Amino acid sequence: MTKPLIVLGVTGGIAAYKSAELIRRLKEQDFEVQVIATAAALKFVGDSTFSALSGNPVISDLWDKPHDVEHVNIAKKASAIIVAPATADFLAHLVYGFANDALLATLLVAKCPVVLAPAMHTEMWENPATKENIATLRRRGYLIIDPATGALTGPDSGVGRLPDPSEIADVVKQVVNRKSNNLPKDLVGLNVLISAGGTREKIDPVRFIGNGSSGKQGRALAQSAIARGAKVTLVGANLNVNVPAGAEFVSADNANLMKEEMILRAPNADVVIMNAAVADYYVENPQTNKIKKGQDKINISLTKTIDILSELTKNKRVNQYFVGFAAETVKNQTELIELSRLKLASKNCDLIVGNPVGHDLGIGQDLNSAVLVSKNLTEIVPEVDKLTLADAIWDFVAKDLAKV
Ligand code: CTP
């Protein structure tokens, strides 16, 4: 059997030296590696290093073998493309669809998943132009591995470093293995309503009670459902991520707004997923002026919010499917399954996704593990990226829906 081909694009940043090690890590994952390097990348690392490690001649100039039309051939053969490091200049070119070197031309042809690992100085990464370019690329479906923090090229340090090559290789492996590259169209014709993110309850005009939810899992659920053919509405509270292309977005930043928007939309949905981290308590009368730092202690009185999910399932239609999450700080999986089972019954859901949280788990992170608990079935999903977990949740739901 031939090995999956990974195209490793290397652009002209100092971190290009780490690309040599990335070739090693990719080969350890049993991939064939083809390096496409820009002229600037080859000023940092010689092409003999790349070709010796990959076992393939480096492509760097479209004019070397014009008869082979290499950019088209390689783009079609690749299982995934990873650009590491991706410079600010390269990202800008990609946004505008330039094709003036072998790497950009290949990317413009490619239909496979593309992962970008930007690396640059902090100021360049934080520049509004780069930020907008990154947001545009994310919206178009490129997977971005955020740069790490640490020592940069000069004496300075900050965010902008290329992450460890083994971490990048792991992401590439997940992307290639992800079934969703070839997802079944089993949600065609279904309206899906997903809540995501974390609500914020006002204390005064500048302060709130909130949580660390980023919206990544909800976004992934929306993305996966769209790929499977569903019509998706995403009701989001304070999302740190972009809304996936193809989803209708409704903003609902606090528990009360979220309740209203979900109650309004749930009757038209075939599947409802309450993924948002909703506040359990809110401040009934937030102060209209900023609270002054006077007294040594102040008390804030909190009132219980309405449980949106339980409210929605009271009016559950025949064939309507409800998914809840159970965010739990637990000692072990058995406890997580037990607590999920309790929420399955108390909230009258068809499926509960039990999610271990706290101690750097779940909320706000890129990876997630879960137990999927329905009336008759329990499935365990080990730690995976949030898109892979979303695929597993939809696999579960689609199977259940097919039984009806
Ligand atoms: N949920 C909701 N409305 C709320 C609170 C939670 O709809 N006011 C939903 C969440 O979106 C999730 C499920 O209920 O799908 C479980 O949320 P979780 O925070 O795990 O549990 P709680 O119901 O808040 O109970 P507890 O915090 O006591 O575990």
Image (tube, helix red, strand yellow):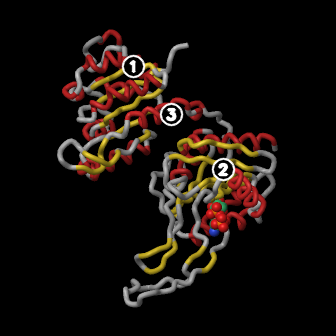
- Residue at numbered disc 3: 175
Could you tell me the amino acid type at mark 1? Val
Mark 1 Cα-neighbour bin, 10 Å: few <14, some 14–19, many ≥20? some
- Residue at numbered disc 1: 72
Say which element carries label 2: strand
In the rendered image, the residue lying farthest to the bottom is 295
Between the residue at mark 1 and the residue at mark 2, the CA separation in whole angstroms equals 38 Å
Task: Mark 3 and mark 1 in contact? Answer it, CB < 8 Å.
Answer: no
Q: Nearer the viewer, mark 2 or mark 3?
A: 3
Residue at (39, 83) in percent of width and height? 290
The quadrant of the image that shows the N terminus is: top right
Image vertical order of residue 71 relative to residue 276, above or below: above
Residue at (50, 17) in percent of width and height? 3
- Residue at numbered disc 2: 191
Q: Quadrant of residue 302?
A: bottom right
Would you say 46 lies left or right of 292 here? left
Which numbered marker is on residue 215? none
Image vertical order of residue 378 relative to residue 53, above or below: below
Using the image as rendered, state which of residue 79 and residue 53 is in the foreground: 53
> Which quadrant of the render holds ligand 1?
bottom right
Could you tell me the amino acid type at mark 2? Asn
Say which element carries label 3: helix
Could you tell me the amino acid type at mark 3? Val
